Amino acid sequence: MGNRKKDRKGRGERKRIERYKRTGKKLQPPLATYPGVKQVDYHRQLLPQLLWLESLLDLYGENRLPGIVYPFLDLVDALGTTGPDPVSGLVESFAFVPAAKRQSFVSDNRSVVEIAVIKPFLSALHLYRDCPMNWLMASYEGAHEDCDLDSAITSVKKWTASLLDRVGEHSNMVRAIVFARYLKA
């Protein structure tokens, strides 16, 4: 009787793995075989893109976060994008805002930019000079000179540590903000 239970479990596992497609030595899950679906390495590709949202969460907390992020991203979305995707909250999505509209956006929405970008994320912008979000601090004179690099590194380490658990509640909440932006578009 005990052997039958083991056999049932073993058969179910084999059926699940049979759905995977073998490509050389690699097995691809069923969803990865659909056209246009690419696997993303969370720690290398997605985690750095979530640092801005994590900085906001760290500074303002989870209750105030949606009230700051969504109105700010709505303002940026009104500028339009040069790419196919909306400004989702990922750091790289800010690169698709048309260059001709950037300066006027920053000057017209200075207080919102200070709350949503400068105050929480300035330390990371000092470490990443080619960041797609740097245009948001272009009109802030001396912004790069005022930063202590040790505190900037400490902040980025703290944000990265919070996002390392890719299936945890914390990182899921940050990714849900990005997902909600794609649903809105």
Image: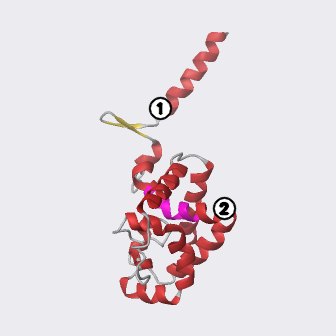
Q: Label 2's element?
A: helix
Q: Which residue is mark 2?
A: 62
Q: Position of residue 126 (x, y in %)?
A: 40, 67
> Which one is closest to the eye, mark 1 or mark 2?
2
Quadrant location, the N terminus: top right
Residue at far left of view: 24
Q: Which residue is mark 1?
A: 17
Q: Label 1's element?
A: helix
Q: For mark 2, does the 10 Å Cα neighbourhood hold few (<14), some (14 to 19), or many (20 or more) residues?
A: some
Residue 124 is labelled as: none
Q: Position of residue 39 (x, y in %)?
A: 41, 50
Extent of the magenta region? 48-56
* N-term-proximal mark, 1 vs 2: 1
Nearer to me, 134 or 73: 134
> Which of the 4 quarters of the picture holds residue 181?
bottom right
Majority secondary structure in the magenta region: helix
